[in-house]
Amino acid sequence: MKEKIQQVLEIEKKARELQERAARDAQEIPVKAEHEAQELIARAKAEAEEEARKIIAAAQSADVSRGISAEAADKSSQFDALAKKNFDQAVAYVLERVIGKA
């Protein structure tokens, strides 16, 4: 009989320990979940900021490229106009020299 009482007491002790551990775990779960959620939010925010930086850099690069392209087109037009002007002068000079020597 004494052994049975001892077994019952042991079972009750283990049950109490399990209940206490379950209560502690239950209290820790929301804290852990909150911590993990904050980590996920921080990671997502960092990734979003990095993606935004990449997009801004690409947009700025595109703007710079368009500016360089426009500047090159402008210089090309200037060179074309200057070449046409010089070509006319060169033809006139050559004709003058040919006609003058002929």
Image (tube, rainbow, N blue to C red):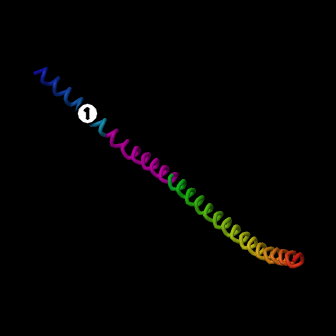
Residue at the spot x=38%, y=41% of the render? 28
In the rendered image of this protein, does residue 66 appear above or below residue 29?
below
In the rendered image of this protein, does residue 38 appear above or below residue 99?
above
Residue named by callout 1? 16
Frontmost residue, 91 versus 37: 91
- Taking the view exactly as shown, the residue that stands out farthest to the top is 2
- Residue 47 painted magenta: no
In the rendered image of this protein, does residue 18 appear above or below residue 78?
above
Quarter of the image holding residue 63?
bottom right
Image quadrant for the C terminus?
bottom right
Q: Give percent across and percent down for residue 45.
A: 50, 54
Frontmost residue, 27 versus 62: 62
Report the number of discs.
1
Residue at the spot x=64%, y=67% of the render? 66
Quarter of the image holding residue 11?
top left
Frontmost residue, 78 versus 20: 78
Q: Mark 1 is on which residue type?
A: Arg
Image quadrant for the N terminus?
top left
Say left or right for 90 vs 58: right
Q: Give percent across and percent down for residue 33.
A: 39, 47
Q: Give percent across and percent down for residue 14.
A: 23, 30
The magenta segment is 23-46
Q: Give percent across and percent down for residue 57.
A: 60, 58
Say left or right for 5 vs 18: left
